Image (tube, coloured by chain):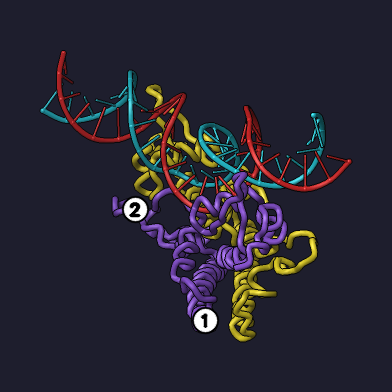
Chain colours: A yellow, B purple, C red, D cyan
Amino acid sequence: MDSRELLSMGDVSKRSGYAASALRFYESEGLISATRTPGGRRQFERNVLRRLAFIRAASNIGLTLDEVREELDRLPAGRVPNRADWQRITRHWRGRLDDQIAALERLRDGLDSCIGCGCLSLQRCQMTNSGDWMATTDAAPGAANLPALLRRPHQFR
Amino acid sequence: MDSRELLSMGDVSKRSGYAASALRFYESEGLISATRTPGGRRQFERNVLRRLAFIRAASNIGLTLDEVREELDRLPAGRVPNRADWQRITRHWRGRLDDQIAALERLRDGLDSCIGCGCLSLQRCQMTNSGDWMATTDAAPGAANLPALLRRPHQFR
DNA sequence: CCTTGATCTCAAGTTAACTTTAACTTTAAC
DNA sequence: GTTAAAGTTAAAGTTAACTTGAGATCAAGG
C-alpha cells in the first residue's frame, strides 16, 4: 500500500468524467469511498476509477443507483472481481436489456396492428391499454400494464 | 350539440383510468379542456376520452407531456382525425420505438463483446464509454454518448 | 504575506408528472 | 334542513440523481 498513489478530487473527476459534485454525492451514498488529508480533502485510491467505470456502465444499462449499490455490495470484498463475477453480472444486465427490448417490440407490434386495423377512433386500441374506457358499464379502470422498465420514473404507480 | 351528454369528473376519471388530480393537471397544462357548471364543476365532452386514450398511448410509447401536447396541437382542429393523421403519428411513434430498440441492441452487443473479450478490469470496456479513464494523459473526459432515449431524465446533460 | 485555484460543507434548487393536504363549496339524497 | 359524497382551488410535497450557490478553508507559488 504505497501511499504515494492516491488521487485528488480533480484527478478522479477528470479521469472518470464525473463532476466533483457527482463524486461527492456518490460518496455520500456509499457507492465510493475516500480517506481524507489532514486538511480534510478527499484522497481516492486508484481502484475508485474501476468502481466508477462500473457505475457508469450499470447506469448506461439502466440500473438505478440503488441497484448499482446492491451490485457493488455483492462484489467480492477484498479481491479484484474475477471472470465469474463479471459473467454473473453481465448475465443479469443482459437479461434486463433483453426484457426491455422485448417490451419495446411488443409495443411496436401493437402499434403495427393498430395501423393495420384502422381503429382510428382508438377504440379497443392495443396502445391505450384501458380496454373499457369506451364501455358504458362501470368496470374497474384498466390497469396500466405496459412495460414498467420503460416508464419514466413516475410517482407511485 | 346536445348538452345532455356531458361527463363529470368522476365519470371521466373512472372511464379513462386517470385520477382526478391527473385530469386537473392535464387541464391546467392545456392537454384537455372542460366547461363549467354554474357551481364551478367541470363538464367534459365525450371526446375527452379519446384524447385521454391518445395521451395514454403516447405516454406508453415514451413521449413527454410536452411532446404529447405538440402532437395534439398538430391534430386537425375541427374534424375527427382520419386515417392519414393517424398514420403520420404512428409512423412517428414507430420511428421512436425503432430507435430505442436499436440503441438497446447496441448496448447488448457491447455487453456480449465485453463478456467474450474478458476485459475483467473494465479497461477499454465498451460499456463504460470513457475510453481514457485509465490513461495517464489528461485527455478530455470521455463523452457520455450512450443512447439518450434510454436515459432516465437527468438534470441537464 | 498574499493571491489564486482547488476543495470543503450544507442547504436548497432542478425536472417531470402528478399526488397530497387543507380548507371550502356543490349537489343529490333523505 | 341536514348530511354525505363528490368536487374545487392553491400550495406544497414526491422521486431520482445530481447541480448550484454561499461562505469558508486548504495548499502552493511568488
- Which residue is labeled 1 in the image? B87
Q: Chain of mark 2?
A: B
- Quadrant of residue D12 within the rendered picture: top right
Secondary structure state at the residue bearing disc 1:
helix
Q: CA distance from mark 2 to mark 1?
A: 43 Å
Q: Is residue A137 left or right of residue B123?
A: right
- Image mark count: 2
The residue lying at 79 percent from left, 61 percent from top is A138
* Residue B155 in view (yes/no): yes
Q: Residue furthest bottom?
A: A116
**Against B54, is A110 above or below?**
below
In the image shown, does A149 or A76 lie closer to the viewer? A149
- Name the front one of labels 2 and 1: 1
- Residue A134, percent from left and from top: 71, 69
Residue A76 in view here: no
Q: Is residue A148 above or below residue A28?
A: below
Residue A152 lies, in percent from the top left, at 56, 56
**Is B154 on the left-hand or right-hand side of C25?**
left
Q: Quadrant of residue A146?
A: bottom right
Q: Are marks 2 and 1 in contact (CB under 8 Å)?
A: no
Q: Amino acid at mark 2?
A: Pro
Q: Is residue B106 left or right of residue B1?
A: left
Which three-letter amino acid code belongs to the residue tagged 1?
Gln
Q: Which residue is label 2 attached to?
A: B141
What's the residue at 63%, 71% (across, down)? A127
Q: Earlier in the sequence, mark 2 or mark 1?
A: 1
For the residue carrying disc 2, how many other residues have a C-alpha within 10 Å: few (<14), some (14-19), or many (20+)? some
Nearest the eye: A57 or B66: B66
Q: Residue at 45% across / 62% down in the picture?
A: B148
Neighbours of disc 1 within 10 Å: few (<14), some (14-19), many (20+): some
Same chain letter for marks 2 and 1: yes
